[in-house]
Amino acid sequence: MTTDSRSIEITQAQLTVSDRVRLFFVRPRGDSPFRSLWINALLIVACVIAIYPALRVFTISLRPNDQLFSTSLDIIPKDATLLNYNRLFTDKNFLVWIWNSLMVTVFVSVLGVSMAATSAYAFSRFRFRGRNVSLLFLLTTQMIPAGMLLIPIYLFLARVGLLDTYKGILLAYVVSSIPFSIWILKGYYDTVPVDLEEAAMIDGASRIITFLRIILPLSTPALAIVFLFNFMQSWQEFPVAYQIVQRKELLWTWPLGIKAMQGQFQTEWGMYAAASFMIMIPVLALFLYSAKWLISGLTLGSVKG
Amino acid sequence: MGGLTGEIVTNSLSDVLPAVLLILGLSVALTLVVYVIMSRVFHSKNALAYGLFAPAAVGLLVFVLYPFVFNILIAFSNWRLQNLKNPSFGLEYGWANLQRIFYDPQLQAAGPLLNTPESTFPVLFGRTMIWTVVNVVFHVLGGMGLALLLNRPLKLRGLYRTLLIIPWAIPQVIAALAWRGEFNGTYGFINIMLTRLGLVAPPWLQDPAWAFLAVIIVNVWLGIPFMMVVILGGLQSIAGEYYEAAEIDGASRSQQFRAITLPLLRPVLGPAITLGVIWTFNNFNIIYLVTNGGEPAEQTNILVTALYNAAFGFSRYGFAAMFSLVIFAILFAFAYGWIRYSGALKGVYES
């Protein structure tokens, strides 16, 4: 790195145009200018495809009601207005939906991650009876078709009177991401050297202390990723919530709310876009902020082995 | 519409918080009890492992295994909306449910929802296969292409990577519903652009073939960033020395790709593709939300969306439960066959 930047300074004086183009896009010792232009062009096209649909949501959210059905492609529409945002708070229970989602999601994630964090330690450090069967079982749960467990859970909740309650959603969600979380965390714990714990145990620390004081702090990035996965999964869950609470609007999570607005495809279209945009932005920010951990965490668990 | 009042907040918290604390308390108690019993009574040196796994194990038994077994029971019943309170169970009902899946030419007994010729089992199965294979192939190819481009020494790499992850970061429900709007024949940006370019504007969501293409486009768009991130992580863990050595030996770029990149990506790609196949096969959200539950006329359904419609659209619980068991069997056989064949998860048990 340091030698690279020094070499730029030396040559800065005698740059040709193509060198300048190349230096703008490419670090020294990279591809030829033509090649780098090509790579950048491809990536820019890919970025546009990736962002454009999200940008359109923003555009539609700014449209006044008489322009919802318009064939304009302007990013900022004519007569842009924030009325749609405003009406979400006055005409809809938008904040209630967000609150419901947030509450359920936080509780489910905390419960799920803490159970997965301890279980994964058992799988990583102990060779106990039933370990392989349990690992196989965890893998098999990933093959259960969407909706399969919802049938018995729905009939069960109906029988005990927990349909249309927060507890119903909580119970239906609580273990859903535990298997996946255990797999990721186990993979990460496996990469933490056993010597660290053994050294502490020679000094008299018990196994539970080494777990709490050594493994957990060292696994913060993996725990953060797993929390994020859990959070995202419950935060945007639709089919289960739809069956359990669709009859009571005050219990709706936000996916039910925006589905209802979109379904009607009338003046609600603008509000739907406004709601989507407001939900999207914090999630995007959180996700992009943690992108670095995501990449390392996803591969760390799987590269090992 | 009152919006979020303090009353709603306190009511919801007082409803949920005790349940959460109860689960937490039970978990801690369970860990301690299992630990003490295993160490004192059975003198197991793995007592702590049993204790730590106990809460999750009980949770999975209660919320996964028990419903799973209950679901098998439901599959052998005539449970549906008409006899919600008093269903009958018996082998003959299970047999009838199974027959309806495979032998009824049009799955008619499942109700009008699965009543079109396009909703027979072979058609749904074939469509699910096309859906899975096409999606995963494009996810891997697209992800690989972008990851290889991003792995070049680019100045704006961080920015590109951030922007390219966006489809993954958008909640699926929002993305699916937004695309549903954009596939509108007149007001969606796709047809606006096609019309302005002088091309034909397809009837995206009205025609079954176009609608199926539409959902595939949406899911490819959504799924590429995940593969890109996973593959990029794998590429960055490959030491540059391999390529330098290959270059000295005169290997071309494509030779380097086949001899170095692909083999060294294997440990990353194997699990990612396995998961990708299972997730895509099982992907309910996109088709259900983009096509509004399989429109037009059930002709975009894959197995899992047809299952959801059978169970919750028409409340044919017994039939749907048997249907779900068949889908599970397919997925299970397929996934284990693939795992054995590819050795994708080799090393998980030993390590």
Image: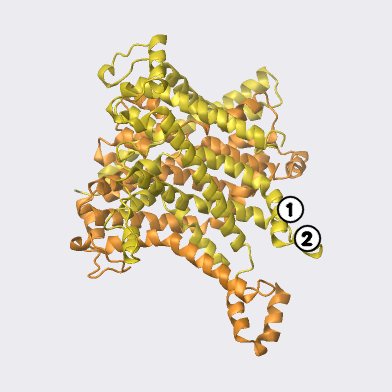
The secondary structure type at the circle numbered 2 is helix
Place of residue B272 in the rendered image (x, y in percent of width and height, measured from the top left): 59, 44
Q: Nearer the viewer, residue B28 or A65?
A: A65
Q: Is residue B238 above or below residue A195?
A: below
The secondary structure type at the circle numbered 1 is helix
Side (left or right) of A133 relative to B251: left
User: Residue B246 has which mark?
Assistant: 2
Which badge, 1 or 2, comes first in the chain's sequence?
Answer: 2
Q: Which quarter of the rendered picture does the C terminus of chain B lie within?
A: top right
Q: Residue at x 52, y 69 (%)?
A: A41
The answer to the question of whether label 1 and label 2 lie on touching residues, with beta carbons closer than 8 A, is yes
Q: Which residue is disc 1 drawn over?
A: B259
What amino acid type is highlighted by mark number 2?
Ala
Q: Nearer the viewer, residue B313 or A8?
A: B313
Q: What color was chain A assigned in the picture?
A: orange
Side (left or right) of B47 relative to A25: right
Place of residue A120 in the rendered image (x, y in percent of width and height, measured from the top left): 61, 36
Q: Nearer the viewer, residue B185 or A261?
A: B185
**Disc 1 packing (10 Å; few <14; some 14–19; many ≥20):** some
Q: What color was chain B assigned in the picture?
A: yellow
Residue A73: image quadrant is: bottom left
User: Residue A241 has which mark?
Assistant: none
What amino acid type is highlighted by mark number 1?
Ala
